């Protein structure tokens, strides 16, 4: 993005704040009607904030986990780094187990382990520097992807997005929502539609609220209205984020993404995935190998704490799905755009 881009207008929200001794987490369970920060003073409190979705979105949970490692380090005496690394390992494992599908969590923990391995002297300071770097790099990647992704969109287009991929889900600006912010600012995007994203309602509770903070009008649709919307010709692109991108270009993302990709292909609507390189997992060959998180049936039994389903009804609640690479027109990362991704183009961009 050019330096004169108005980030102050188009990027106002931060989900995480490091206070110097604790991590303040904007509690996304309470949005949009309460803007409350939860203070995490230990790595286990961070793990719980990730598990309970107080902080969610692949890049944001990676960044939160990095700060969790910093907090675990602060609970240990300064001293021998090898001893500290061994003592930190259980806390890292608990952070890693908080949510299984988004690879950014394991990626951030690997970066923190690497920082510890390189550390000499003040290893606690080095952990803190690494967490700051992870946060800073994510924001820079999002701004770059905003420019790259928006350039693919013809002026006056309509777009549909899913889940929340904005500042709330990242260090700031967002992935898919960053492309939408940039596209709106450049006049390429005339209309934004957002799906509700049942059952947790990331689209209804978070995305349209986040866009409203920037003065961007968005139209909310029921998830089940997406195919009909495409048929009316009002959207030219579906733009989504990712929780894990495999070596063959298959993409795990919020449940419902796969059916949007199928509907988009049927209607001649283009499908764009926007995610930083930290979401790319070249060690996983294809989507079938991804562990899909399943959450409590209770998320389907009611809305906002009010039961809407008769007692005794079973529910199945997988919260991610996998979109096969051949339904994807473009994967945008900060390293560039991969058109029609497959194993060859992924390996060319990301190596082994
Ligand atoms: O369960 P969530 O809300 O953490 O799921 C989030 C998503 O699926 C996002 O689309 C993805 O993490 C990309 S966020 C930039």
Image (cartoon, rainbow, N blue to C red):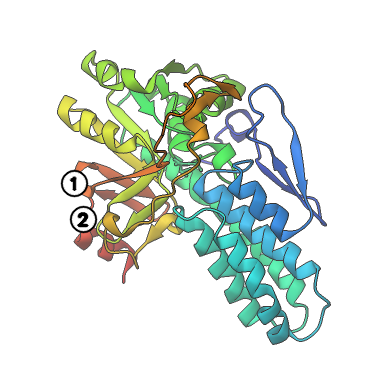
337, above or below 210, in the image:
below
Pointer 2 local density, CA inside 10 Å: few below 14, some 14–19, many at least 20: some
Question: In this image, 328 relative to 48: left or right?
Answer: left
Whether 317 is drawn above or below 280: the answer is above
Q: Residue at x 54, y 69 (%)?
A: 110
Residues at marks 1 and 2 touching, judged by CB atoms closer than 8 Å: yes
Q: Is residue 210 left or right of residue 340?
A: right
Task: Tell me residue 63's x, y (percent).
Answer: 60, 54
Which residue in the structure is indicated by mark 1?
326
Tell me the element at label 2: loop
Q: Is residue 156 visible?
A: no
* Residue 235 visible to an observer of this rendering: yes
Residue 177: horizontal and vertical position, in percent?
47, 34
Is residue 39 found left or right of 342 in the rendered image?
A: right
Could you tell me residue 22's position as x and y percent? 79, 53
Residue furthest toward the front? 312
- Name the disc covering residue 342, or none: 2
Instruction: Tell which of 339 and 68 is nearer to you.
Output: 68
Mark 1 residue crowding within 10 angstroms, few (<14) / some (14–19) / many (20+)? some
Alpha carbon separation for disc pair 1 and 2: 8 Å
* Residue at the top extreme of this rendering: 232
Which is nearer the N-term, disc 1 or disc 2? 1
Q: Secondary structure at mark 1?
A: helix
Nearer the observer, 53 or 177: 53
Instruction: Place residue 74 in its image quadrant.
Output: bottom right
On the image, the x and y values in percent for residue 348 come to 26, 64
């Amino acid at each position: 993005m050019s330096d004169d881009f108005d980030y102050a207008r188009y990027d106002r929200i931060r989900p995480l704040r490091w206070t110097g001794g604790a991590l303040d987490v904007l509690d996304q369970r309470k949005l949009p009607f309460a803007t409350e920060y939860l203070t995490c003073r230990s790595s286990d409190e961070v793990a719980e904030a990730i598990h309970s979705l107080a902080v969610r979105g692949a890049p944001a949970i990676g960044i939160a986990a990095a700060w969790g490692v910093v907090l675990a380090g602060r609970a240990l005496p300064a001293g021998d780094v090898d001893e500290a690394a061994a003592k930190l390992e259980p806390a890292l494992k608990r952070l890693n187990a908080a949510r299984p599908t988004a690879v950014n969590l394991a990626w951030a923990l690997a970066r923190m382990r690497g920082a510890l391995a390189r550390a000499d002297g003040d290893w606690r300071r080095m952990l803190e520097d690494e967490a700051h770097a992870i946060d800073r790099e994510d924001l820079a990647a999002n701004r770059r992807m905003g420019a790259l992704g928006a350039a693919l969109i013809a002026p006056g287009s309509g777009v549909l997005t899913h889940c929340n991929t904005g500042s709330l889900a990242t260090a700031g600006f967002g992935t898919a929502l960053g492309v939408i912010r940039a596209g709106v600012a450049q006049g390429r995007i005339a209309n934004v539609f957002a799906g509700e994203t049942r059952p947790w309602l990331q689209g209804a509770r978070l995305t349209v609220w986040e866009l409203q903070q920037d003065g961007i009008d968005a139209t909310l649709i029921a998830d089940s209205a997406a195919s009909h919307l495409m048929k009316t010709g009002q959207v030219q692109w579906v733009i989504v984020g990712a929780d894990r991108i495999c070596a063959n270009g298959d993409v795990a993302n919020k449940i419902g993404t796969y059916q949007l990709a199928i509907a988009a292909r049927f209607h001649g609507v283009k499908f764009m995935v926007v995610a930083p390189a930290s979401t790319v997992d070249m060690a996983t060959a294809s989507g079938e190998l991804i562990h899909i998180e399943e959450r409590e049936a209770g998320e389907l039994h009611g809305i906002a704490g009010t039961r809407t389903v008769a007692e005794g009804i079973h529910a199945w609640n997988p919260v991610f799905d996998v979109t096969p690479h051949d339904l994807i027109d473009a994967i945008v990362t900060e390293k560039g755009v991969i058109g029609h991704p497959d194993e060859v183009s992924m390996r060319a961009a990301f190596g082994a």
